[in-house]
Amino acid sequence: MDEFHRGSCLCGAIKYGLSTELKAVTHCHCRQCRKSHGAAFATYASAPASALSIMTGADSLMAYESSKGVTRQFCCRCGSSLFWTDSTGAFSEWVSIALGTLDTPLRPRKQKHVNVGSKADWHNISDQHPQTD
């Protein structure tokens, strides 16, 4: 497999590879992403699920259905949020990758903030990236 990116969880139990470039870099401010990451927002990019390979630690990868059709995957050892999918949406064959887990550089040309209507009231968005509710 030609790898464009590699990543891992905090403890290193789970290592993954991506055989394609990532697309649609988003900083999501929804309540679920904030809760899942324990931060003001979560940053993801997407790829076809078929391009994601779990290299090591598949037995440590746990899943949680956070809402109807939306599954979040994380490491059962260290708790790192890694991936999420939406089986009901237009991109049901895609996976979103938590960019903080990448071990390879990523220099996206475009980024955007989404779900800013539910952002943490203590956080001010200070960059120039587009914003949507």
Image (tube, helix red, strand yellow):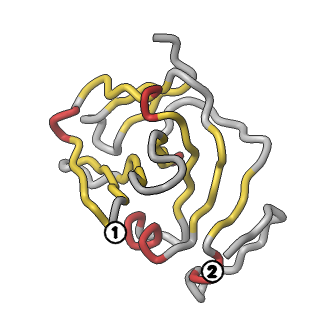
Decide if residue 102 is on the left or right side of residue 69.
right
Decide if residue 118 is on the left or right side of residue 75.
right
Seen as rendered, the residue at the extreme bottom is 121
Residue 70 visible somewhere in the drawing: yes
Determine which residue is flagged by label 2: 123
Residue 101 visible somewhere in the drawing: no
Q: Specify the quadrant that holds the N terminus.
A: top left
Image: 25 above or below 5: below
Image: 11 above or below 72: above
Seen as rendered, the residue at the extreme top is 1
Amino acid on which disc 1 is placed: Ser
Badge nearest the viewer, 1 or 2:
1
Front residue (pair 111, 14): 111
Name which residue lies at 23% across and 42% down: 61
Q: Secondary structure at mark 1?
A: strand
Residue 72 image point, x, y percent? 34, 55
Seen as rendered, the residue at the extreme right is 128
Residue count near mark 2 (Cα–Cα under 10 Å), binned few <14, some 14–19, many ≥20: few
Residue 102 image point, x, y percent? 50, 38
Determine which residue is flagged by label 1: 67
Q: Specify the quadrant that holds the C terminus.
A: bottom right
Name which residue lies at 25% across and 59% down: 64
Residue count near mark 1 (Cα–Cα under 10 Å), binned few <14, some 14–19, many ≥20: few
Name which residue lies at 46% across and 67% down: 33
Which label's residue is closer to the chain start, 1 or 2?
1
Q: Quadrant of residue 43?
A: bottom right
Q: Secondary structure at mark 2?
A: loop
- 3D distance between C-alphas at marks 1 and 2: 25 Å
Image: 53 above or below 68: above
Amino acid on which disc 2 is placed: His
Front residue (pair 14, 66): 66
